[in-house]
Image (cartoon, rainbow, N blue to C red):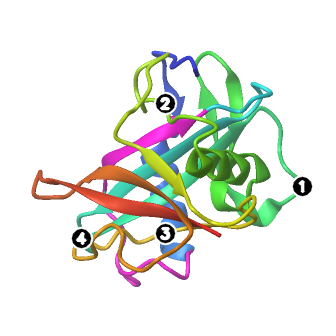
Amino acid sequence: MATIHDTTLVPGKLDLLSDWLPRQPWYRAHGNPPALVRSGGFRLDDPAGEVGVEVLFVTDTAGASTYAVPLTYRGAPLDDDGALVGTSQHGVLGPRWFYDGARDPVAMTQLRELATGRVVAAHQTRSDTVDPTVTGSWSGPGEPAEVEVVRVLDPQEPTGAGTPPGEVTADVALPDGSRVRRRVAVVR
């Protein structure tokens, strides 16, 4: 399980996402600057120990939408500049390059492994702690090949709507303080 450092991150994740999120085609409040608050999330371990993987849930209180944003953090840049969310200075690890995890092979592999039950999710803010509220399922034939992140977590859509062969579900905090279970990734 990942070690969570009690240190600074400048700029912080919400600051990076406030700039990046409005430029995404699935962002719902076009023309309005986001006002982001954390709504939960979880971490996944990179077996090589090189890449930080986190699925962050953020609510844009200005646009009243909640998003699932997989992020990866790396100590060196990837070749895919289009996936770059931004850079930040970590108080312990130094410079970090933050990427859209939906375009990072490490994050997509770990989400696929979570769906099949070969890995477990780690708590977002506590070191060495499993997050039992995050679950995966796979009922398809053979091995899953594709992962699609559900970017907008619709508060009205029940988990299990539709019949994908696999999915990752998690508890998400809504702006009113309630918690709902939502699909955050579909696996085929």
**1 and 3 marks in contact (CB < 8 Å):** no
Tag 2: amino acid: Ala
Tag 4: amino acid: Pro
Residue 123 percent coordinates (x, y): 42, 30
Q: Which residue is mark 1?
A: 79
The residue stretch that appears in magenta: 24-44
Q: Earlier in the sequence, mark 1 or mark 3?
A: 1
Q: Quadrant of the C terminus?
A: bottom right
Question: Image check: 65 left or right of 5?
Answer: left
Q: Which residue is mark 4?
A: 155
Question: Image check: 56 left or right of 62?
Answer: right
Q: Distance of mark 2 from mark 4, alpha carbons?
A: 24 Å
**Dot 3: what SS?**
loop
Q: Distance of mark 2 from mark 1, alpha carbons?
A: 27 Å
**Numbered tag placed on residue 153 in the rendering:** none
**Dot 1: what SS?**
loop
**Numbered tag placed on residue 122 in the rendering:** 2
Q: Is residue 112 above or below residue 127?
A: below
